[in-house]
Amino acid sequence: YKAQLSNKITISALSKALPLPGLPEDSDPMNINFHRRILITQFTGTGCGYCPYVISMLRSFAQIESYKDLFVLAAVHTYNSDDPMYMAECQSFASLLGVGSYPTLSLDMRAATAITNPSLTAFEKLFVGEYNNYVTNAGLSASLVTDAGQAALKVGVKAGANGKYRVGAWLLEDNIEAQQSNYGASGSFNIHNNAVRALAGCNSANKDFYGTELELSAGATASLDFAFGFDSDVKPENCHAAVYVCEKIGTGWMVTNVIDVHPGES
């Protein structure tokens, strides 16, 4: 423009040939009561020396039998830019939720809860309160396929009440080896799981992470197709997807249900 050149950008085209399996059959089409799970978002980074305390606490929490099927965990790496899992586009997400220190946890994309040296008992109380205070009016199903540099996700939504819903998804990766700073927490923390690697249905430039909007009547269903593109260092065989649905509670949106789907599974 007027002899000026913009910065060069790279555009990666996703193959349309990546096959999508169908959604699982609804075994009870008349049912509109749904099992609810909580989305736990962990804001972290390899340079965060206090983050292993939260990681250790979450590991202990995940071993408690009564909670195992009640949550999905996603780790958003926004602390240091030299982190191999760093997500620059999630900086606005951290800002949206009021993340001012690390480590920080958020339940269901609601206001952040900062925890430096967390008590498992205190987190259990927080989690149970969140679970009991909100219900879900939406059920989810999903199927995922992955390939080098790309993944395709089919999502099904079923409404339990008339209203507007928003649906989004995050591609997560496990078994990433990276040196983790540690200020004294017991254990090994150099293998990272559930790291967010790509977003779908979100607009980070507009600080909109709640997903694609749908309007459904009670008992109605809808399906959405999402595509992820990711860097070559992401191993597709180690990826899975967190799929979430949001509802408007009061004046704002929050997650009311979430599922976790692995490649080749529904």
Image: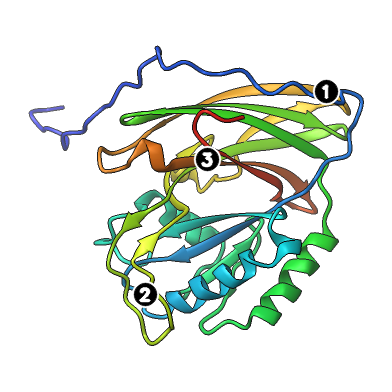
Which quadrant of the view contains residue 205?
top left
The residue sitting at 79% across, 24% down in the picture is: 26
Amino acid on which the number 2 mark rests in the picture? Cys
Its colouring scheme is rainbow
Amino acid on which the number 3 mark rests in the picture? Ala
Q: Position of residue 197 (x, y in %)?
A: 40, 46
Packing grade of label 1 (10 A; few <14, some 14-19, many >=20) is some
Residue marked by disc 2: 48
Q: Is residue 245 visible?
A: yes
Q: Position of residue 116 (x, y in %)?
A: 51, 82
Residue marked by disc 1: 220
What numbered label is drawn on residue 241?
3
Outermost residue on the top side: it is 17
User: Are the residues at dot 1 and dot 2 in contact (C-beta closer than 8 Å)?
Assistant: no
The residue sitting at 54% across, 58% down in the picture is: 96
Which of label 3 and label 2 is nearer to you? Answer: 3
